[in-house]
Amino acid sequence: MTLRSHAGSSARAGGASRTAAKLARSIPEATVARLAVYLRILGELAEQGADTVSSEELAAATGVNSAKLRKDLSYVGSYGIRGVGYEVVPLHHEIERTLGLDQKQAVALIGVGNLGHALAGYGGFGGRGFPVTAMFDVDPDIVGIRINGILVDHVRDISAVCAARGVTIGMIATPGSAAQAVCDQLVDAGVECILNFAPVVLQVPDRVEVRKVDLAVELQILAFHVARRRVAGTDGSEPAKGATNGSVVLPR
Amino acid sequence: MTLRSHAGSSARAGGASRTAAKLARSIPEATVARLAVYLRILGELAEQGADTVSSEELAAATGVNSAKLRKDLSYVGSYGIRGVGYEVVPLHHEIERTLGLDQKQAVALIGVGNLGHALAGYGGFGGRGFPVTAMFDVDPDIVGIRINGILVDHVRDISAVCAARGVTIGMIATPGSAAQAVCDQLVDAGVECILNFAPVVLQVPDRVEVRKVDLAVELQILAFHVARRRVAGTDGSEPAKGATNGSVVLPR
DNA sequence: GCTACTTTGTGCGTGCCTTCACAAGCGGCT
DNA sequence: AGCCGCTTGTGAAGGCACGCACAAAGTAGC
């Protein structure tokens, strides 16, 4: 994870005049990501009829430290009861509101190939407030068909269709070579948040937010860990072998 | 542009034996994620016949700060030439070695549904040292067919097949309800790194590393930003700045 | 060979995020 | 009502990562 980019940190000390932004008040990016996870668990708990849940329980279910969880929840307001825990339903509702999930976002999917098809069919979107309301491709065999009731349009119409349907989020699942052009059209249509699955770094105006999801990178990170474990395991203590570097040692 | 990465959640932290030294000597997780990105750009540069590249150029292409990039590269050793830049091919090779990509990792894919199918067909894997060498599902219509030449086995055989084929990385693309059981079998087979696309938090022994990619969470994070901009926009406050970026894989 | 220019490598300051530890608050029991 | 135990909410400390700014090191020109 982790990376980051700026998050909600505003520039300088400006806390004072921030009154307008009730929920926008600087919630750390890392916290936002975890809130989404808490939200899912809370949904499950609600289905199971749970009434309240303690920070310790919820932390265990989501795999985080309980203190961190409490601090995260403190950003959405105080919905806990000391000595008892958090009320599941109100908390769930409040996190939804904080994340802006109470207002549905229209999502456009560009690139209905292998991955795009999977994304279109992924139940987690429509069911969670993210109806895919527009799809695009260039392949004449794909343009014109319907997927989940949505007609696939030609990419040349991205700007017009997205603007017309009020699309706020774009998902790019095209080959890398087409991604930037598609991105530019989305920006023209007024889309300000993009989820990019293509293996390229998109160039966008500052006002546009891009999140990148790169499967190959994820695997490479895991490969690094595999290799690391392997070295740690086989090595008893022995020194470096031939290779190069007499690099710095610096035990940190 | 902005980016970020995420991070996935990694289960564990530092327990591994610290003797490893050479390449394992504490490379920050954030750096590892970026190295994978540099690697791709370097590959493209190599194809274009570029001989050397400066940190400034490479930083621009990958969307990071040039100082950060140089610091990242310093972890893999000093392969730059002052006054000139980095030699593309040697650097590419060295990053590959550092990430452990010189040793191919056998990958198993569990769940050949919508998403699994897309993952199986994703060219980025086999072409980058991650051959999918085993696939599993429970659907009788799917078990027995071949995808990219690989026979889909029944999930009940996960442990045996993975152990036999030396699988080191597992990708779970099953429904959430099946994920934990599948994960347990992978762990039994000796797999120590798992990429989890199912919307559940997997419980694993400390020695196993899990990265989670959650599409719904990614979209929710973007939805938060949409909402935040909307609030900020109506009250006329700051526009947000540009950014740096990170990379993420599917949501982490 | 010397000077000027370019680019790497890194020490250091800054800020965010995490984690610990504990006071405050709330329910239940007597 | 008063006390006890449990859980939240948060102040403070530590760690990590980011980015600046500069010295070191190499190239090019004279």
Image: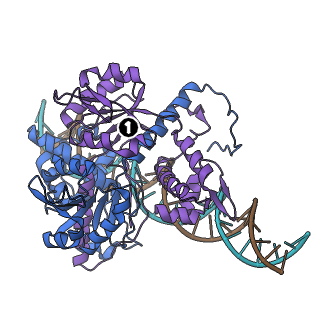
Chain colours: A blue, B purple, C cyan, D brown
Q: Is residue B187 above or below residue A25?
A: above
Badge count: 1
Question: Which residue occupies 69% across, 45% down?
Answer: A247
| Residue A105 figure quarter | bottom left
Screen quadrant of the N terminus of chain B = bottom left
Task: Quickly name the residue at label 1.
Answer: B11
Image location (x, y in percent) of residue B249: 36, 49
Residue A124 left/right relative to B75: left
Image location (x, y in percent) of residue B138: 19, 27
Question: Which residue occupies 27% across, 75% down?
Answer: A188
Q: Is residue B14 above or below residue B86?
A: above
Q: Residues within 10 Å of mark 1 (few under 14, many from 20)?
A: some
> Residue reaching furthest front?
A140
The chain ID associated with circle 1 is B
Towards the viewer: A135 or A10: A135
Q: Is residue D10 above or below residue B76?
A: below
| Residue B84 figure quarter | bottom right
Answer whether residue A21 is visible to the viewer in this image.
no
Image location (x, y in percent) of residue B235: 23, 78
Which kind of residue does numbered mark 1 sit on?
Ala
Towards the viewer: B48 or B32: B48
Residue A207 left/right relative to B175: right
Towards the viewer: B156 or A125: B156
| Residue A129 figure quarter | bottom left
Question: Which residue occupies 17% across, 48% down?
Answer: A121
Q: Is residue B11 above or below residue A90?
A: above
Towards the viewer: B97 or A74: B97
Judged from the image, the secondary structure of the residue bearing numbered disc 1 is loop
Image location (x, y in percent) of residue B176: 20, 37
Answer whether residue B139 is visible to the viewer in this image.
yes
